[in-house]
Image (cartoon, helix red, strand yellow):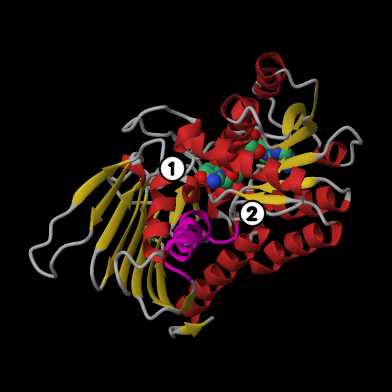
Amino acid sequence: MTQTINVGIVGFGWMGQVHAKALTRVRQHYPDLGATPRLVGVADPATDGRLDYARDVFGVGWTTPDWTELVVRDDIDLVCVAGPNFTHRDVAVAAAGAGKHIWVEKPAGRNLAETQQIADAISAAGVASAVGFNYRNAPAVELARDLVAAGRIGDVRHVRVQLLGDYCAHPEGALTWRFVRDLAGSGVVGDLASHGLDLAQYVVGPIGALLAETSTFIPERPAAVGTSSHFARGGDGPLLRVENEDYVMTLLRFRNGGRGVLEASRASVGEQNSYAFEVHGSTGSLAWDFRRMGELRECLDQDYQGASWTVHRIGPGDGEAAAFQPDTAIPLSFDDLKVIEAKRLLTSIVTGKPEGATIADMVTAAQLADAVLRSDAEKRWITL
Ligand SMILES: NC(=O)c1ccc[n+]([C@@H]2O[C@H](COP(=O)([O-])OP(=O)(O)OC[C@H]3O[C@@H](n4cnc5c(N)ncnc54)[C@H](O)[C@@H]3O)[C@@H](O)[C@H]2O)c1
């Protein structure tokens, strides 16, 4: 017996399409899942043919430029909230209020208050939720978490987390919604550091205090022309002010006594999706890099000095890898992480028990992001 879950997607850009692909594929990887998603509708005001793509390629029956029509439709059970950040709160609160389950992209709200409003609406409606903390779903990350929890590296001493990108490194990169505080909220703190803060807590444990400083390397950018993606160049018009940060450095104190550093940048020349962490313990260490998805580097079970690293190649026994490939050293992709996210959300809907990262985890990350911004503004440690 499988339950049909009718899905509406708000925002059919990069993430909206990744959600659509994940939902299309999820039962191919998890045939015994008790739910079958069906793409019903897409809401997006773009006029560049992406709604035709949704209809012609994904078989979506109904499209609209207006998300307010989508969230109240009786034939939709689950709403993917995948538009720009300034749409998330209104879409998610309205959809949850109409009794829909919610899959919302990070950073959910533009700030802590909005993220909390989304969480409150989800809680009041009693619906299921998933959030876009996809890197948690990597089998190597889950293995690292298990090894830390099992005490295999001893006591956690220090942690290094980095999220470096170059998608805003070009000084002529268009001033899209991402650089405007009213539209995006924070800059790299919400966009990338939120992933790192979540990963650090997922693998190591709760963060108790932090000290942060931000910087905006490129203070002005040319205005966007039309619907500009992440990576578009601006026009010839006047330069406009960038209202949020390109870079953040953060010192972390974990509640288990560990110390950490987290660095995130959207404007690092030579770095693309360079998302990685190292966890150093009293008897061993672990390291993961998103760009080497099929590997966890381990330094375990040796003497204190002169110990060497080995590469654990991810195989069917690790995390959810068996749902994707039957052999070792065939890495999962970014889109596969979203299939796992979809599977966990659909399982939550069917069982009524939360599985995977939920809106509660996003509220925790938003509390940390808010503390990062307050620490930067007030030039002091913030205790959580
Ligand atoms: N989880 C991740 O790793 C990850 C990666 C990238 C982006 N994101 C998040 O996903 C969200 C979308 O980012 P993206 O990169 O897909 O952006 P995008 O620009 O590729 O897509 C956004 C889409 O929303 C549409 N849109 C704009 N206004 C709208 C409105 N009022 N109603 C409905 N649709 C509207 C746009 O036309 C576009 O199709 C952001 O919140 C971003 O932070 C998450």
Residue most toward the right?
A: 74
For numbered disc 1, what is the local secondary structure? loop
Mark 1 or mark 2: name the one nearer the start of the chain: 1
Q: Is residue 187 magenta?
A: yes
Q: Amino acid at mark 2?
A: Leu
Residue 273: where, in percent of width, then height?
37, 44
Horizontally, is 67 left or right of 309 in the view?
right
- Residue 173: give its label: 1
Q: Real-space Cα distance between discs 1 and 2? A: 17 Å
Q: Residue at x 84, y 35 (%)?
A: 76
- Residue 263: give its label: none
The image quarter containing residue 327 is top left
Q: Residue at x 89, y 41 (%)?
A: 72
Q: In this figure, which residue is indicated by the disc labeled 2?
A: 183
Q: Residue at x 69, y 25 (%)?
A: 47
Report if residue 66 is visible in the image: yes
Secondary structure of the magenta portion, mostly? helix
The span shown in magenta is 185-205
Horizontally, is 327 left or right of 270 in the view?
right
